[in-house]
Each structure stands twice: as C-alpha cells, then as structure tokens.
Image (cartoon, rainbow, N blue to C red):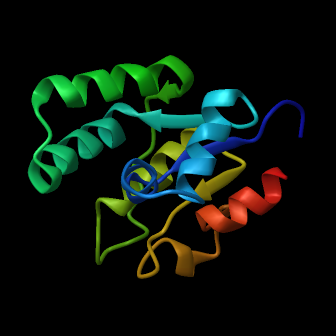
Amino acid sequence: MSGPPLLVLDTNVIISALVSPDPPRNVVEACRAGAAQMVTSDVLLAELAEVLRRKFLWRIDQVAILLDEMRSFAVVVVPAARVDEIRRDPADNRVLECALEARADYIVSGDTRHLLPLGEYRGMPVISPAEMVERLQ
C-alpha cells in the first residue's frame, strides 16, 4: 500500500468522534493530519447532517461548518454501483457503495449489528475504530 490508507468511516464513527474522546476521535484526527485518507460520499455526508439535526439538534449553520471542514480533508466520491448486501438496514449499503467506489483499504464502523459482523466486504476489512487506531500506530 503506497500512501496513507483509504478509510470509509461510518456515520456512527464521526458522531462518536464529535461527542466522545478516542478511539473514534483518534481516527478522524489521523485523517485530518494525513496519516490516513478519509473517503466519503454526498449521501453519507447528507446522512451525517440529518442525524446531527434530528438527534443532536444542531443548527443548519453548525452542520454546514462541520461538512465544509470534513470536505477540506476528505475525498468525496460518487458511487457508480448500488449495493444490496445489508437488507435489515439498507442505509448501511451506502457505506459499502462508497468503499467499493473508493477501493478503500478499510471500512471503519461501530455498527455491531450489520457492518462489523461482515468482517470484510469484497476484500476490504470492516473494523472498529479501536482496531483502526492500532493499525495506524
């Protein structure tokens, strides 16, 4: 692998990084510092915005500032393929679509019901933030 690893972060990892300390925050900070490259999509960013507004009551301007900051260090891809791997929570398929388009090295998630149990998706390991921190050290 040349260059920093490409990471697709599930929305729950980003939310956790905002409200609690490590390891999710460490993963996001590693992306911000260039030790890893975060990859996302407009659909995932929209999901993040929606969760922040609905569950955490963030104002539109607060969400816009965060999304602008994330776009400053993340690569935004447009997934060409649709995935229907996770039928119990179809929104999780958007994470897989992003990872597939980016040819990500890792999918980082805290989702113990749908994403983490996959273990890997088309050769891309699906790991927890704590595992990602270990791999980045």
**Identity of the residue furthest to the right in this view:** 2
On-image quarter of the N terminus? top right
Q: Residue 9: horizontal and vertical position, in percent? A: 51, 50
121 horizontally vs 51: left or right? right
> Residue 30 occupies which quadrant of the picture?
top right
- What is the tally of numbered marks visible in this picture? 0
Q: Residue furthest front?
A: 21
| Residue 59 picture quarter | top left
Residue situated in front as seen by the camera: 7 or 131: 131
Residue 113 location (% of width, % of height) = 41, 82
Q: Is residue 23 visible?
A: yes
Relative to 61, say whether 10 is above or below: below
- Quarter of the view holding residue 80: top left
x and y, in percent, of residue 58 in the image: 15, 40
Is residue 50 toward the left or the right of residue 127 in the image? left
- In the picture shown, does residue 71 fall above or below 133? above
Report the residue at 65% width, 66% height from top: 130
Identify the residue at horizontal 54%, vertical 56% (top origin): 24
Q: Residue at x 35, y 42 (%)?
A: 44
Given residues 89 and 9, the one toward you in this image is 9
Is 70 situated above or below 19?
A: above
Where in the figure is residue 27, as x and y percent of width and height?
Answer: 62, 48
Q: Is residue 124 visible?
A: no
